[in-house]
């Protein structure tokens, strides 16, 4: 089995820059804005990378990252609140665990696309694939058709 390439400083930075500073507090009360300020410290960023790489190399996801809390919020302007459809569930996860999951997702998506594991016509939920790409493909099919 081929080994997993270690995460780099740039991968962590690129991943966290995409995180919305306005998102709600997470389970450990750390905001993305706070994590972004933490990684300005060189020691902190390399400790986070070490933890992410250790999780992959040891094939172990820390139980701390698996913990979640669900908050139930009633939806506004409902005539009755006797149905589950009248409520919105918000799941709070560990911020650092979410960061590592995002890094793993980026890594997996890059390698599945670059190794042609996903058909070239697949567009949904993939990086570097947009509605413009869908329009170009559709135009090509119509013209060749």
Image (spheres, rainbow, N blue to C red):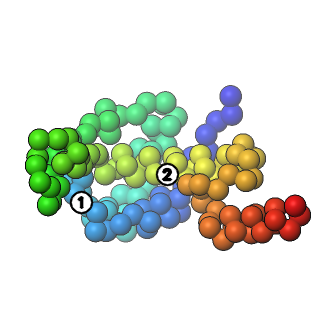
**Residue at 11% across, 54% down:** 79
Q: Return the residue found at the far front.
A: 79
| Distance of label 1 from label 2 (alpha carbons) | 20 Å
**Residue at 50% across, 64% down:** 14
Q: Earlier in the sequence, mark 1 or mark 2?
A: 1
Q: Residues within 10 Å of mark 1 (few under 14, many from 20)?
A: few
As rendered, which of 32 and 42 lies closer to the eye?
A: 32
Measured as percent of width and height from the top left, residue 122 is found at 68, 51
Looking at the rendering, in which quadrant would you find the C terminus?
bottom right
**Residue at 11% across, 41% down:** 82
Residue 136, compared with residue 44, is above or below; it is below
Left or right: residue 131 compared with residue 7: right
Measured as percent of width and height from the top left, residue 119 is found at 74, 47
Q: Which residue is mark 2?
A: 103
User: Helix, strand, or loop for circle 1?
Assistant: loop
Asked whether residue 102 appears in the rendered view, the answer is: yes
Measured as percent of width and height from the top left, residue 64 is found at 28, 37
Q: Which residue is mark 1?
A: 24
**Residue at 40% across, 52% down:** 99
Q: Return the residue found at the far right.
A: 144
Asked whether residue 42 appears in the rendered view, the answer is: no
Q: Residues within 10 Å of mark 2 (few under 14, many from 20)?
A: many
């Amino acid at each position: 089995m081929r080994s997993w390439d270690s995460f780099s400083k740039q991968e962590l930075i690129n991943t966290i820059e995409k995180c919305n500073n306005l998102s709600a507090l997470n389970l450990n009360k750390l905001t993305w804005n706070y994590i972004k300020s933490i990684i300005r410290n060189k020691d902190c960023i390399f400790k986070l990378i070490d933890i992410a790489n250790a999780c992959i190399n040891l094939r172990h996801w820390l139980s701390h990252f698996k913990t979640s809390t669900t908050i139930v919020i009633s939806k506004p302007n409902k005539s009755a609140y006797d149905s589950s459809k009248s409520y919105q569930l918000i799941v709070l996860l560990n911020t650092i665990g979410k960061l590592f999951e995002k890094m793993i997702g980026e890594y997996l998506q890059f390698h599945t696309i670059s190794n042609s594991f996903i058909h070239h016509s697949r567009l949904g939920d993939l990086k570097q694939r947009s509605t413009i790409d869908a329009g170009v493909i559709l135009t090509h099919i119509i013209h060749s058709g």
